[in-house]
Each structure stands twice: as structure tokens, then as C-alpha cells.
Amino acid sequence: MGGAADAKKAPFGSSLMSVFMHADAADVALMVLGLVGAIGDGISTPAMLLITSRIFNDLGSGPDLLQEFSSKIDENARNLVFLALGCWVMAFLEGYCWSRTAERQASRMRARYLAAVLRQDVEYFDLKVGSTAEVIASVSNDSLVVQDVLSEKVPNFVMNAAMFFGSYAVALALLWRLTLVALPSVLLLIIPGFMYGRILIGLARRIREQYTRPGAVAEQAISSVRTVYSFAAERATMAQFSAALEESTRLGIKQGLAKGIAIGSNGITFAIWAFNVWYGSRLVMYHGYQGGTVFAASASIILGGLALGSGLSNVKYFSEASAAGERVLAVIRRVPKIDSGSDTGEELANVAGEVEFKNVEFCYPSRPESPIFASFCLRVPAGRTAALVGSSGSGKSTVVALLERFYDPSGGEVALDGVDIRRLRLKWLRAQIGLVSQEPALFATSIMENILFGKEDAAPEEVTAAAKAANAHNFISQLPQGYDTQVGERGVQMSGGQKQRIAIARAILKSPKILLLDEATSALDTESERVVQEALDLASVGRTTIVVAHRLSTIRNADMIAVMQYGEVKELGSHEELIADENGLYSSLVRLQQTRESNEVDEVSGAGSTSAVGQSSSHSMSRRFSAASRSSSARSLGDAGDADHTEEPKLPLPSFRRLLMLNAPEWRQALMGGFSAIVFGGIQPAYAYAMGSMISVYFLTDHNEIRDKTRAYALIFVALAVLSFLINIGQHYNFGAMGEYLTKRIREQMLTKILTFEIGWFDRDENSSGAICSQLAKDANVVSTRQKLSMLMLQRKFI
């Protein structure tokens, strides 16, 4: 969205500050405490190694004087206890403070971003937003990126940085010779972190992009499930879904291989230990250093290098968060030309409702080369009904858009009671106008809450009165849950006529002085049109009403009719006045429409007029049946629904065995991955044994024995390095393949089963297309991830 280019141009330091722009005083305090905690947490490890070196030296040297020896051991033990308590406090501050402030700042960012988006004018959405999905992705993804960085990546970076500097400070203080010799090994410790960052993050991004393809296929099929069922297209849909999953499966297997190589390359630490063990023995034999000091310095060097690699891997997340923060700030700081959040402007004490367009010039921002109005003029007296008719593209709906001030004219003015609407406070102006469009936008909530969008603080009595005025109260009262009935996603539970009447009630609730009807009945059948038209006629009484209509039969009773062509009013007058001119545009439009309707009747009639009546009745019944099928089968059938209510079938208990059986075709990968995991589980005990034994070697007195044992343990460390690399590749590649195939298989089986359910199941509130697609995407991934982790952990813990 807007601001992405700016985010690229901004220096990294300044753009990084955009991540913290939503912090208040409490957040600053939390971040300071979290910073102290992260530094303390990082320093605790080198401090522990420093104390450990003293303990090893005391134990290795033996008690020359028993009392002095006991005193030293007691002192170091107390220091370890104090260090443990301090580490607990620091880790708590690090975890709690950063998580808390991240949640607070991300929540504030989402609220500000959504408020800023809703503040924008329509021009912004025409020019800079590709779709509503882009807005939703920004408000969720960008805030989640920032929240993740604040809660995890920043404290992790600070902690690792503190550990790196603390470890090398301790190593230099303990044994500067070994530290300087081993310093180049830091580069080898950093490489695995960057490998993981570069390759795996790139693959993860490609997988996320690829994952949208099967999701799009599933969303289209589920949202249009009636069409899929009517054409028996379930098999074709599944074929498309499976084909779309193939590429993400291949990339997932590739990701497992890359992860195995990246994590396996951490085995370089064993090779570095081999060098440090060998060189440390030389320092013990020829320079008189103590064994505990050599061990602590070696451990500090390796842990410090690993910490640096782990910390630097977070830098890429800082870049992503900075870009996300800049995108959000660009929207928040953008001041629209038509600012709905501004409180400036006049408010008229008494609104009569007279509307006048004076020499208006206008073209849409997305099509500046195609002017809609050149010098448009129209005056609608207060309390009168004006109808706008004409061919498509003549500018009828543009009149509504300009009066609602979705756009401003480039020339001329639109006046309310003689005052240019640009001088009026925008929210007040829109509160005086009620709009009912061709396809009313109902939200996935109850009828009551949909009507309350017209006036949030309205009493229930006012809602009922508005529904009665809109001819909607009767059908609402007949529903089992009345005004609490859920309308479903985009109003799918309601018929077209019911949705229109709810929209009319919503418009009437705020008692508008001006009522705008933009082709409010054009999408309805004859019966629904009659009912809705009666509601519109009732709602128009005493209000200035502007009607945009294609069906001329609905505007016969209008006080004035404006015939528009090419952005100009060609004819103006009442129905009787305009129809009197047989050569006029209005008369020709009436004749064309009558001819088309008579042709349709002739085609439908077939065997006679009774057939026509039957067909019309059948069409009407078809509409009602469609509406009934959309009604929630769990609640809108009243008593019948209660009679049909049966207990939910008891699902079998979750079984890890059943999960493994789903992976049965991948038994080869399971054997190889399981063997690799078992061997890898034995590497750490072998490493611990070799390390513990090596500490005792440093305290031997025979140099030949030190040399022989050092050589043996150094070779063990080299072997562990090679084995760790190969085994990690084996386990992560094989378990990754198992997980990807399991994910693909589960998603296919889920969608196959879902496409066998009856239509009534899809009409339930909990089974919206969004909820089902979310289950398809997330549940299978969760099962796959848990399966991989369970097998890895079980087999490692077994060892």
C-alpha cells in the first residue's frame, strides 16, 4: 500500500523507530525494564562460566587446607544460588515486559490503522488499494510482524548481544591466548545462522505465496457450493485442489532438506571444541594454566560465537518490521482530501432538504481522461421525489456519490439548502442522508445490529418503528429468533427482498432529511419488488428523495423525472409531462422497456396465459425456496427445527496411532527419520561424556597421558561434528517429507468430506466459507507439525 516506496528510501535507523512509534509512557517503562532483563539474562551465562571455572579449579587441585577448600566451595555455591535468583528475575522481566508491551503496541497500531483506513476517502481505495483483502492483510500481517519483533526478536537480539560481549570479556579475562587463537572460529559459528536466515526464510516466503493457490480453490468452491453441487463438479474441484497442493508440498520437502543442512552445520561447534581441547592441553602442559580456566574460556568462546550468530539472524526481521511499520505509519499519517475524521465545518440549524447541483464538473480519479459531468445542473425542491433515468453510464449513480460526498467535483458546487456541502461537517452531512443501494451491504451479525448501524444509540422501540416503516417488521417477527436472527455472511440467510427491507429500515432509523435510492429494486423479482416498492414509497413521505431507476414503472409517481444522457439533464418534468412528448427520450425509453417486457412475456407464455401465470408463480416460489434454503437450518424452521434436532455424534478420542496410520505410505521415510532421530538423541550424551572426561584430563600430571587422551577426545569431537551434520539432514528431510505428505493428505480428505455435506450444513453460522478455509489451512498444518515434533521428541527422549 501507499508508503512502501518511502519505507525503502528511509534510512534503516529512522525506519526502525517506526516500530516503536505506538508506545506510550507505560510501554517505554516496560521496554526499559525488558531491556535490563534481556541484558541481565545474556550476562548470566558468562557469569556462570566464570564461577564454574573457579569451582573446577578448586575441585581439580584438591584440598591443600580443608577449611580453606570448604570455604571456597561454599562461597562459589552461594554465588551460583544468587546468580540463579538474579537470572530468574532478569528472565521474568525480559519475557513479561516485552510480551506485554508488544501486545499493547500492536493492539494500538491495529486500532489506529483501522481508524485511519476508515477515515480515507473513496479516491484512496480507487487508486491505492487493489482489494479489501489488501487492507485486511495489512491490518493483520503488518501488525503481527511488528508484534513478533517486539515480543521475541528484540529481546532475543539484546540477550544474545549481551551474551556475546559478556562471553568474550570473560574469555579474555580468563585466558587471552586461547581467546585470540580461537577468535576466527566466530565466523564458522555465524555461518549456520545466516544459512538458516537466507535459505529457509526465502523458502518459507515462497511456501506462503504458494499456499494461497489451494486456499483460493477451496474458497471459491465453498462460497459457491450450490453451483458446485448443481453441476456435480466435486471431482473436478478436488483435482484442481490436489494440483494446487503439489507445488507447496515440493517446496515443503525442500525446506526440510535446507533446515537439516542449516541445523546440521551447527555441528561445527564440535570441531571447534576439538581444536580448543587440543590447544587447551598445550596451554595446560606448557604454560601452567589450570584445567577449569581452559574449559570455561573454551565454553565462553563457543557460546559467545553461537549467541552472535543467533542474534544476527534477527536483523532481517528488524528490516521486515521496519517496512511494515512504515507502511502502517504512511496510512495513519495520510490526510485525505475528504476527511471523514475532521470535526471542522458548519452544521445547519434547520435542514429543509433542498438539493441543487450548480454547473458541476467531475471525472472519476481512476479515469481522469473520461469526464462524467461537464456542466451538470439539477435542483430538487425540499420534500419532493426526483427520479433519475437514462442509459448506463449517463451519470445517475454519480449524482448519489457526489451528494454523499464520496468525491468532490472538480468544478461547480453541490448545495444543501443553498450551502456548498464542502463547507459542512462531513459526518453531520452524511447523518442527514439515508442510502439504499442496489445490493445492500449486510454484515454477518443479527438483524437488530444491522439496523442499528443507522443509529448506534437507538432504542429497541425505534428499531421496531423503523422496521415497520420499511415493511420489514412482519417477516422479522415470524422468524424464531426475531430481531436476533443472524443474517449470515453478506446477508446470505436472507432473500433479496428481505435484505432490501432491512437496508431501508437501517436508512430510516436515523431519520434522514434526504433519502437516496440507487436502483433499490432492480435486482428483485416482481413480487419482492412490489413489497419493497411499497416500503420505499412509505419511507419517502416527507423527505427529499432522489431515485436512480432502470425500471420506469417504479417512478411513475415521482414529482419530477430527470432524463440523463452523457452527463447532462436532457428532459425534466413529471411522468405525464414527459410521456406527452412522443419524440422525447423518456417516451422512447418507456416504449423500449414495454417492448422488451412484452417479448419476455410472449417467450414465457408458451401454451397460454395460464402457463405464464404458472411460470411467474413458479419463479416466485423458486425465490422463496432459495431464501428458505439459505435460512439457517438449525434455527429458522421453528418447531420443525427443534423436532429435527438430534444429538451430535460422539467423535472418537484423538489417537496418535490413527495419525501414524495416515502416514503409512511414507513408512520408508519414517524408518530413516526415526533411525536418524535415535542416533541424534545419543550425540548429546556422548558429547557430555567426552566433555566431562576432558575436564579431568586437564588435571592429570603425566603429559604423555594428557597427549594421548586429548588426541582421542579430539577425534571423538570431530566424529560427532560429521555425524551431527549427516544425521540432522536425515531426520529433518525424512520427517519433513512425512509432514508435507500428511498435510496434503489431510487437506484433501477434509475438502472431499466437506463437499459431501448437505447445503444446510454450510448455512450454519460456524460453517462460513472463511471458517472452513481457515480449518483447511491451519488444522492440517497443526497436525503435521505436532506429528513431526512428537516423533522427534519421543525418539530422542528414548535415548
Image (cartoon, rainbow, N blue to C red):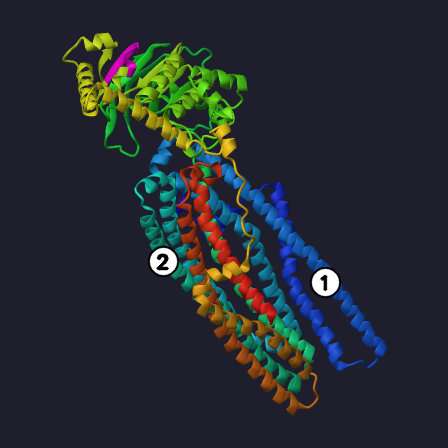
The image shows residue 179, relative to residue 477, as above or below, that is: below
The one of 522 and 311 positioned closer to us in this rendering: 522
Residue 795: quadrant of the picture: bottom right
Q: Position of residue 382 (x, y in %)?
A: 37, 10
The image shows residue 330, relative to residue 267, as above or below, that is: above
Q: Position of residue 50 (x, y in %)?
A: 69, 70
The answer to if 464 sits in the magenta stretch is no
Q: State the SS at label 2.
A: helix
Q: Which of the image's four quarters has the C terminus?
A: bottom right
- Of the numbered discs 2 and 1, the one sitting upstream in the chain is 1
Judged from this view, the residue extending furthest toward the left is 583
Q: Do the residues labelled 2 and 1 touch (CB within 8 Å)?
A: no
Judged from this view, the residue extending furthest toward the right is 67
Circle 2: residue type = Glu
Circle 1: residue type = Leu
Q: Give the range drawn in magenta.
A: 554-563
The image shows residue 561, relative to residue 122, as above or below, that is: above
Q: Name the residue under label 1.
A: 83
Q: Where is residue 264 in the image (x, y as percent from the top left)?
A: 50, 70
Task: Give the Cα separation between the discs numbered 2 and 1.
Answer: 52 Å
Residue 410 seen from this side: no
Q: Which of the image's four quarters has the N terminus?
A: top left
Q: Classify mark 1: residues with Cα within 10 Å, few (<14), some (14-19) or many (20+).
A: some
Q: Residue at 66% x, 58% y: name it.
A: 40
Residue 631: quadrant of the picture: top left
Q: Name the residue under label 2.
A: 246
The mark found on residue 766 in the picture is none
Residue 368 seen from this side: yes
Q: Position of residue 502 (x, y in %)?
A: 43, 23
Q: State the SS at label 1.
A: helix
